[in-house]
Image: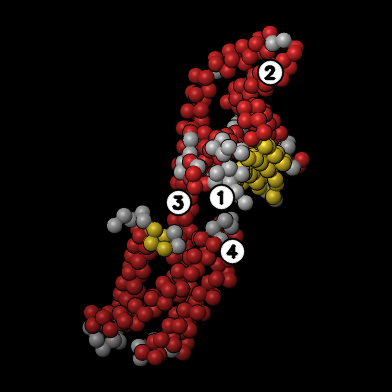
Amino acid sequence: MNGNRIAFWGITYRQLGWVLLLYGVSILFYDMALSISQRVWAKQTLGAYFVSELPRILLDYSFKLLLTAPFWYLLFVRLAHWPLMRRVMLHIALLPLFVTVWQLLYYATSDALGIGRLQGDGQVWDTYIGALFYLVQFGIFHAYAYYRDFQRQREREAQLRELALKSELSALKAQLNPHFLYNVFNTISASVPPAQEHTREMLAELSDMFRYQLQAARSETVTVEEEIDFVRKYLALEKARFGNRLQVSIDVADETLNLRMPPMLLQPLVENSVKHGIAPLIEGGRVSVRIRRQGGQLQVEVADTGVGLTEKPLNGQGGVGLANTRLRLEKMYGTTVRLLPNEPQGARAEFDMPVLG
């Protein structure tokens, strides 16, 4: 069995194995310590006392393990987005709850089964050892989670450096073509007769697009307004090709225009909507771009009224542009493009990213 396969709640079989090993070692040492401490007045041999205490200790730690599972799920799954210090402070309330519930279950069961347990003032040792074990195991869990997150962060940084290097090399290789092309476009535009003003405008927009792509290759971020302006130009050229078959709607909140985002994130999504959503339909359709700010998140949505997800490559990895957008979002912000059906028809691609001032 692959140790990295998920058993439940995001726990892998390997991690589950380590937890069971921790409990096994704890049971062994607790039983040994108890047997050695009792040997002065115990009427049985050390080995016999060890065996006789084992059922009670197994019952004890079984309830500890049973209670640990929901506590772990709360701290490391449901509240994983909380800062580490805030989760650590939560143990002030969780520790007494853990010990109290464990004692109630353990005492009631051991009394019902007739298995011996500490009585009277001796119960303080159950409270002390139970609390100590809680602190030790969750200390180990927090240390492991911190180490795992640190390793993942290092891997993300390494992948981002590799991606940045590849992008830089690609930009250097392609640098001559954009310079040459948009200079040629400007030359052609200048030679177009005034009567063909629409053609001149299209050439100018195409030239601006190449200029923006070259600028984007050198910049880590651009303003939302700059990115939307590029998308407008792209859709204007596509509309010249599709005519009335392509309708465009761009709805960007004014408060987001001066915020920043990585360049060339929207164009691959818009291109997929046009190419795989609208183009196959004789009657065409509408492409909509919407950007809003919600607290500390920038919410981006590209929707179309095309053929929908079932026939579009957005269901898989999509083309190179879309795959690159996904990869950049995952490595930079830990988010991704969500692909959903659009109502009443078509598909919707959306993602969130932190607000960059």
User: Is any atom of residue 178 visible in this view?
Assistant: yes
The residue at 63%/24% (across/down) is 209
Mark 4: secondary structure = helix
The amino acid sitting under disc 4 is Met
- For label 4, the residue is 89
The crowd level at tag 1 (other Cα within 10 Å; few <14, some 14-19, many 20+) is some
Instruction: Specify whether 250 is left or right of 45.
Output: right
The residue at 39%/79% (across/down) is 60
Calculate the distance from the C-alpha at mark 4 to the C-alpha at mark 3.
Answer: 21 Å
In the rendered image, the vertical position of residue 231 relative to residue 154, given as above or below:
above
> Percent x, y for residue 271?
57, 34
Mark 1: secondary structure = strand
> Do residues under tags 4 and 2 come within 8 Å of each other at their CB atoms?
no
Calculate the distance from the C-alpha at mark 2 to the C-alpha at mark 1.
Answer: 37 Å
Mark earlier in primary sequence (2, 3): 3
In the rendered image, the vertical position of residue 302 relative to residue 140, given as above or below:
above
Calculate the distance from the C-alpha at mark 4 to the C-alpha at mark 2.
Answer: 66 Å
Closer to us: mark 4 or mark 1?
Answer: 1
- For label 1, the residue is 340
Mark earlier in primary sequence (1, 3): 3
The amino acid sitting under disc 1 is Leu
Calculate the distance from the C-alpha at mark 1 to the C-alpha at mark 3.
Answer: 31 Å
Closer to us: mark 4 or mark 2?
Answer: 2
Mark earlier in primary sequence (4, 1): 4
- For label 2, the residue is 199
- For label 3, the residue is 148
In the rendered image, the vertical position of residue 133 relative to residue 232, given as above or below:
below
Residue situated furthest right in the rendering: 254
